[in-house]
Image (cartoon, rainbow, N blue to C red):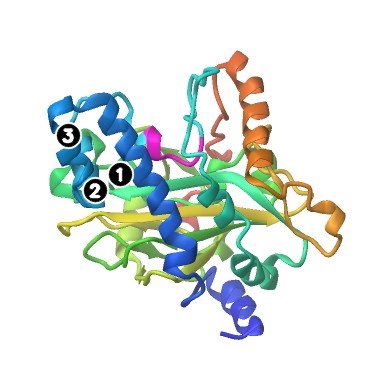
């Protein structure tokens, strides 16, 4: 796809799928290797010694499936690429691996983003990793957990603070690590919905942010965003989307990174933001993995005393003008 095509389609539809941008062996497999390294550490900590060798020898997906059945406190935080939102401590941790940093700094991704954001681009700390478990293996309470199960209809701008909602040109970069189809829970998207602006949202049963009266969207035509390994999907902050349930027998693994025009608020201060692309090389001050980790450690120090990493400002505009029922 040409650079003109990327920008035109993004502006028209609110999203664009760009095929075969990333290389599995060089760009993606290192992240899966980091996840498996963490799994092996968990095995050594929680699995009886006589079973450890057997479990460590299991394939990636079977090993993860085994671990999810154990009574391990907050096991999914081990694979999260950000700190837990609530009650951070000095010992809080996340999947702070070099492979994730390399993906954030990936020049092939930046070249695509430049067509939309321009030459001055910053990494945004709103980022998630998702290992979507086959739904029949999920506990009922986790069916609507966006990191494990279904993700409800929402707009990404809704998870920013007020400043970010108004003043940040945010682009989501969604990256699949496994082939993503309708059956294993790909995203659904409402084409051109970014033109509606930010809508009123509420809280779901798991505390997730979701569009108010979201059931109305089930009657509107949506597009399943199937994707192959190596593809990326770029999405506007106001594009309405959700994910389908994973009714397959396997896991669906993805990461969503976010970027914005440099100099704009992140929508989650004081979490780390830094230049990843610029015409002025002096702006690129975070050049290695340890500098990135130092930024997160500094941010954590500020968050421990207040007992939260960030607060979600769920959009609840006065009146009903921003209600879904009024704009569709």
Image quadrant occupied by the C terminus: bottom left
Horizontal and vertical percent position of residue 143: 24, 42
Mark 1 vs mark 3, CA separation in Å: 14 Å
Residue 69 — which label?
Answer: 3
Mark 2 vs mark 1, CA separation in Å: 6 Å
The magenta span reads 77-82
Q: Which residue is drawn at 35% across and 66% down?
A: 220
Horizontal and vertical percent position of residue 38: 37, 38
Q: Which residue position is annotated with label 1?
A: 148
Q: Are marks 2 and 1 in contact (CB under 8 Å)?
A: yes
Q: Residues within 10 Å of mark 3 (few under 14, many from 20)?
A: few
Q: Earlier in the sequence, mark 2 or mark 3?
A: 3
Q: Earlier in the sequence, mark 1 or mark 3?
A: 3
- Is label 1 in a helix, a strand or a loop? loop
Q: Residue at x 18, y 38 (%)?
A: 53
Q: Nearer the viewer, mark 1 or mark 3?
A: 3
Q: Residue at x 20, y 43 (%)?
A: 65
- Is label 3 in a helix, a strand or a loop? loop
Mark 2 vs mark 3, CA separation in Å: 12 Å
| 62 w.r.t. 187: above or below | above
Q: Which residue position is annotated with label 2?
A: 133
Instruction: Please identify the quarter of the rendering in which residue 305 is found.
Output: top right
Q: Residue at x 46, y 58 (%)?
A: 240
């Amino acid at each position: 796809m040409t650079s003109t095509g990327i920008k035109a389609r993004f502006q028209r539809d609110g999203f664009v799928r760009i095929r075969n941008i990333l290389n599995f062996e060089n760009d993606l497999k290192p992240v899966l290797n980091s996840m498996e390294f963490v799994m092996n550490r968990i095995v050594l900590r929680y699995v009886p010694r006589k079973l450890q060798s057997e479990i460590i020898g299991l394939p990636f997906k079977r090993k993860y499936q085994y671990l999810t059945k154990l009574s391990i406190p907050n096991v999914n935080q081990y694979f999260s690429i950000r700190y837990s939102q609530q009650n951070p401590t000095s010992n809080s941790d996340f999947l702070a691996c070099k492979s994730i940093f390399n993906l954030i700094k990936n020049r092939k991704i930046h070249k695509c983003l430049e067509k939309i954001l321009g030459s001055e681009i910053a990494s945004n700390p709103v980022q998630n990793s998702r290992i979507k478990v086959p739904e029949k293996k999920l506990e009922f309470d986790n069916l609507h957990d966006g990191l494990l199960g279904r993700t409800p209809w929402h707009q990404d701008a809704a998870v920013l603070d007020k400043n970010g909602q108004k003043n940040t040109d945010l682009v989501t970069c969604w990256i699949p690590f496994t082939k993503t189809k309708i059956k294993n829970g790909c995203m659904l998207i409402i084409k051109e919905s970014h033109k509606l602006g930010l809508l009123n949202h509420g809280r779901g049963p798991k505390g997730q942010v979701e569009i108010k009266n979201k059931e109305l969207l089930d009657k509107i035509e949506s597009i399943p965003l199937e994707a192959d390994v190596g593809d990326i999907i770029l999405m506007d902050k106001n594009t309405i989307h959700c994910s389908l349930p994973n009714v397959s027998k396997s896991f669906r693994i993805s990461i969503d990174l976010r970027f914005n025009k440099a100099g704009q608020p992140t929508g989650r201060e004081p979490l780390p933001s830094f230049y990843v692309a610029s015409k002025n090389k002096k702006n690129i001050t975070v050049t290695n993995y340890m500098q990135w980790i130092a930024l997160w450690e500094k941010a954590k120090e500020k968050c421990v005393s207040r007992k939260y990493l960030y607060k979600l400002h769920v959009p609840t505009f006065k009146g009903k003008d921003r209600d879904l029922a009024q704009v569709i």
